[in-house]
Image (tube, helix red, strand yellow):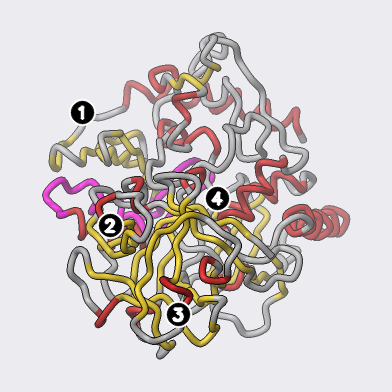
Amino acid sequence: MKSKLLILSGCLVLAMNSCRSDIENAQSNSMDHTTSKLDNTTIHKLLINGNDTYVNEVNGEYFFADDITISPEQFNNLKMQANSELSTSEKSTIVSSFIKTWPNATVYYTLPAQGSLSTQNYNTFLTNINKAFTMISSQTSVQFVQRTNQTEYITFTYSTGNSSPLGWQKNRVNGIKIYNITYPAIIAHEVMHSMGIMHEQCRPDRNQYIIVDVTRAQAGTHHNFNLYNDYGGHGAFDFGSVMMYQSTDFAIDPTKPVMTKLDGSTFTKQRTSLSAGDYAGINHLYGPVNTTSGVNGTYTMTTSLISNKNVEISGSSTTDGTTVVLNTSSTGNNQRFTFSKSDHGYYIIKSLLDPTKVLTVKSNGTANGTAVELRTNSNTDAQKWLLFNLGNNGFGFAPKNAPALRLEVKNGVTTNLTPIVIGTTDQTLQPPVKQRFKLTKVN
């Protein structure tokens, strides 16, 4: 199978090079969005956060990378992110709806039909799908459950290539296409895209570790090297990740690699197993959950401003309206919180002092600087928090009643008893340090 893939890759290089002269002049829709044509492909070039992001459109289907498809709604969200005339708050709401993880860390699936496969190859396909599931779930909180009547699930088709939709989307079936039916780790790679996991070479901090020269990439393949500013890289950059490409992938000339390490050396990829970094990333993306029992755990919320200050319930009081503040870290229950799933993507943050009391935006306020307090859980939007996974930067929190605002340490001050409030953010998923919190599981 590997040799066949190499032959196909060689044919692709020839085909892409022979078509380069057919590229039409770019048609400018705006400074933020231009399009060009390559055979039957429309190449969208979007300027997002100062970086070029490419999406290939083929017969109405949108490719965020060669093996990642996105829905028309997700593509429209990207176009809106590229609209420089939109306000920060509008863009913030857009990004929060771009990608979703699977509710309760449970991925429902159906197995493929036999189709044109021989009985032997079909059984191999089924075996390796299950091996891919086991590979992912063996060290993570994610579970794969065969579908009964669920609306959202993944399904598989034997195809001429490998691809998957990106993330969970309400009322969508994620149709995963697989060519490499004999490689469980390649199947796992595509399943991980459906779980909302991106390519390692596209993480926002990649330029600290590698040099990417897209001028060396074949025409129409630049989307494989998009820089995803709105996604968090977790842990150190992982050259051994099953989601990492190798230096010469999509290169016009293999002697001129698209990617190198900072010292100019090249690297290869592996598709045999998930790395330790892959497992840690999945658990971070699908956290906070207790990976041993599959239920929510107890956490401290440490500000990223300083390593020894936590979010605290003032005076350990459980009276409705008690203020939430920053204070020197301790082992008291007034600094310990449990996270219970609410609406999809949202959490109720309960105090360990009294599980009936939760972090609440005061008076359901939506203004910059509104205080956060402890209050009896009444299931209001002011008590539901959308978690933004910031990778190594921890988490950001947006209240459902004010999705453009973020939980923050007021004015970024680290003095004890500084109020915790909601405030405006200058960016979407990578907010200021005062709006970033590290969650540490304590039991």
Q: Kindly report the distance in space between the C-alpha atoms of the residues bearing marks 2 and 1.
A: 50 Å
Say few, some or many: other residues with alpha carbon within 10 Å of mark 3 (under 14 / 14 to 19 / 20 or more).
some
Q: In the visual, does 354 lie left or right of 376?
A: right
Q: Amino acid at mark 4?
A: Ile
Element type at mark 1: loop
Tag in front: 3 or 2: 3
| Residue at the spot of label 4 | 197
Q: Position of residue 145 (x, y in %)?
A: 71, 73
Q: In the visual, does 46 lie left or right of 205?
A: left
| Residue at the spot of label 2 | 410
Q: Amino acid at mark 2?
A: Lys
Q: Earlier in the sequence, mark 3 or mark 4?
A: 4
Q: Amino acid at mark 1?
A: Asn
Q: Earlier in the sequence, mark 4 or mark 2?
A: 4
Q: In the visual, does 365 lie left or right of 326?
A: left
Q: Position of residue 137 (x, y in %)?
A: 74, 59
| Residue at the spot of label 1 | 25
| Residue at the spot of label 3 | 317
Element type at mark 3: loop
Furthest residue toward right? 120
Q: Which residues are magenta?
A: 59-87
